Amino acid sequence: MTPPRLPDELCELVIDHCSRGIDTPDLISDSHSVLRACCLTCRAWLPRSRLQLYSCIRFRRHDQVDAFLETITALPFLGNHAEQLSVSPDIATEAYIPFARTELVQRLRRVRTLVLFVSWDKYPPGYHALAAQYPITELHLLVSFRRESDLFRVLSAFRNVERLHASPWLSRADGRMTSSAFMRYRPRFASLKALEIRSDSFLLYDCPLNLAFGPTLTELSLRWNSDYMFPGISAGFLDYVSQLHALQTLIFTFTFKLRTHLDQKDAAFSDWTASIISRTRGHSSLRTISLRFWQPGADWQDEPLSRRDFLDNLLSRAVQRSLNSPQHLRKVVLEVSEGAGDPPDAGVWWSREIHKRLPRLNAQIRVVLRPRHCECALESLLAERRN
């Protein structure tokens, strides 16, 4: 009698589930360990496990580049699995990782996403041109630059980027550009559609965003971290939002830490959000607004601030009024962190409370509970780099 076996499709689902977090910076090590174990489970599991294992390549040390090149030279087909390249040096021992070596670029022709957690002053002049040899369509820049012109040189090199996650900061107070220099170095993207900016980035305050990124965005995402100072929204940024008439999706991400109360910086998030949403009143293409409230490393039931108090503070009356402004809005998505002791119907509670606070909203309301381990990968690495 033939022993029972799981269908191949079910095995592939198991392997795919094990790969969750493979493209998330602080979960990638765990995902790699699990996928390596999957590779050794049996011969039938090897192809799918290897496909997922090599889909995201991360370099933390200089010698890893040489080791990886040896592997894909011996087994060239493995290079075809790579879709994302992440460069995040161990800041204690590494500064420069040659991720754009010619032989590496030639073998990783399917890489479309590039994630950089680096100090750009460690790289030689002109390295942005080498990096731009990758056919990148999604670029994550969590990079320290000495001068603003260095940032825009890098952006100008990636003309075919469609999704840009920009979280740069300047290591020098005198690193800002003059207007004439900006016109010289400003990027000219061929098809930029999605832009994400952090609330503490200088791009929100003094940068002519319309010239830098154009008015044709279909998705705009803004990230707020309660640990960082927030200077406030500039009139220039609000004007830029008003010009995004092709905008379809607007996303606000707020990462916070639960305390006995939300302080003044946290409360400013509501005013910030309401001001931006109100500028989309005339955008007939806007269909979705997402509010992401992420709470790393805490459980709701163990904290002095209740879910209801949290909603009262952050989903303020100003935000409620602004959500009624966009005339063609179809969906409002609320993403919140799940707690370890949440009941199975926690999503129902959130949905009911949101409907109470938005009784006149014509758009559909959707609630998404995020697993705790998925949160704040970006924040932990940014804090490490900035400190």
Image: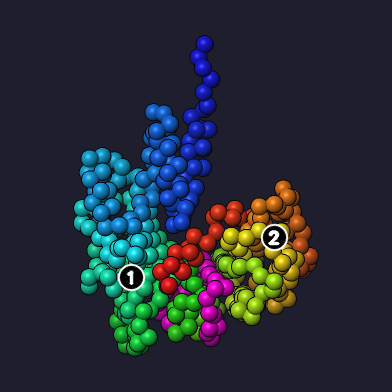
How far across and down, in percent of the image, does residue 271 sit?
A: 64, 79
For the residue marked with disc 2, what is the amino acid?
Asp
Q: Is residue 84 magenta?
A: no
Badge 2 marks a residue whose secondary structure is: helix
For the residue marked with disc 1, what is the amino acid?
Ser
Neighbourhood count class around disc 1 (C-alpha, 10 Å): few under 14, some 14–19, many 20 upward? many
- For the point 34% across and 57% down, the residue is 60
The answer to whether residue 285 of the structure is visible from this angle is: no
Neighbourhood count class around disc 2 (C-alpha, 10 Å): few under 14, some 14–19, many 20 upward? few
Q: Is residue 221 left or right of residue 173?
A: right
Q: Is residue 298 left or right of residue 44?
A: right
* Residue at the extreme front of the image, as rendered: 92
Q: Is residue 190 above or below residue 180?
A: above
Colour approach in the figure: rainbow
Check whether the beta carbons of the residues at disc 2 and disc 1 lie within 8 A of each other.
no
Read off the residue under disc 1.
Answer: 119
Badge 1 marks a residue whose secondary structure is: loop
Cα gap from disc 2 to disc 1, whole angstroms: 38 Å
Give me the disc on residue 302. Answer: 2
Rendering quarter of residue 163: bottom left
Image quadrant where one finds the C terminus: bottom left
* Closer-to-camera residue (346/183): 346
How far across and down, in percent of the image, does residue 226 sit?
A: 57, 73
Give me the disc on residue 322. Answer: none
Q: Is residue 260 left or right of residue 11?
A: right
- For the point 20% across and 53% down, the residue is 103
How far across and down, in percent of the image, does residue 234 sit?
A: 52, 84
- For the point 49% across and 60% down, the residue is 377
Per the rendered image, the range of residues in magenta is: 207-235
Tell me which label, 2 or 1, sits earlier in the chain.
1
- For the point 52% across and 76% down, the residue is 228
> Which marked residue is nearer to the observer: mark 2 or mark 1?
2
